[in-house]
Amino acid sequence: MLKFLKQFCIWLGIILIVATIGLVIWDTIQINTLAAVANANKSSSAGFIENPRNWVLLGVAAALIGGVVLGLGLGMPGHTFKQKMEARSGGVGGPGQSAVSAGTGSDQGM
């Protein structure tokens, strides 16, 4: 489950960052159009040009969330601590069985 969550976070972060790049390109086009219309001091043939501030804020939010999710995905371990310990010990014991009851521990203190 942890490997799936790690891969999911990595891919979601990459998708959000790619979407952010697309939004930045779209915002650049909108802002250039708005500047051209403002400099010409006349309305465009498409009618009212809305303020692209909302799209810029959406792009910033997507970049922030994408960066956080990608960072989480890259920072997550591939295995849980329990899986690592079982791999090191060769899978001694099952659930609820300690190394001492499996006969591999020492009897110090008994």
Image: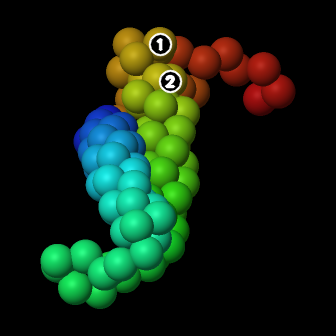
Q: Percent x, y for residue 63?
A: 48, 51
What kind of colouring is applied to the model shown? rainbow
| Disc marking residue 88 | 1
Q: Is residue 80 visible?
A: no
Q: Percent x, y for residue 50?
A: 36, 82
Q: Percent x, y for residue 28?
A: 39, 52
In the image, 78 versus 12, the foreground residue is: 12
69 vs 13, left or right, is right
Q: Residue at x 17, y 79 (%)?
A: 46
The residues tagged by marks 1 and 2 sit, at their Cα atoms, a distance apart of: 5 Å
Rendered position, 62 above or below 38: above
Residue indicated by mark 2? 85
103 vs 78, left or right, is right
Rendered position, 35 above or below 25: below
- Neighbor class of circle 2 (other Cα within 10 Å; few <14, some 14-19, many 20+) is few
- Element on which disc 1 rests: helix
Q: Residue at x 77, y 29 (%)?
A: 110
Q: Residue at x 47, y 31 (%)?
A: 74
Q: Amino acid at mark 1?
A: Arg
Q: Is residue 67 visible?
A: yes
Rendered position, 87 above or below 38: above
- Element on which disc 2 rests: helix
* Outermost residue, left side: 45
* Outermost residue, right side: 109
Q: Are marks 1 and 2 in contact (CB under 8 Å)?
A: yes
Rendered position, 64 above or below 90: below
Q: Percent x, y for residue 106?
A: 67, 16
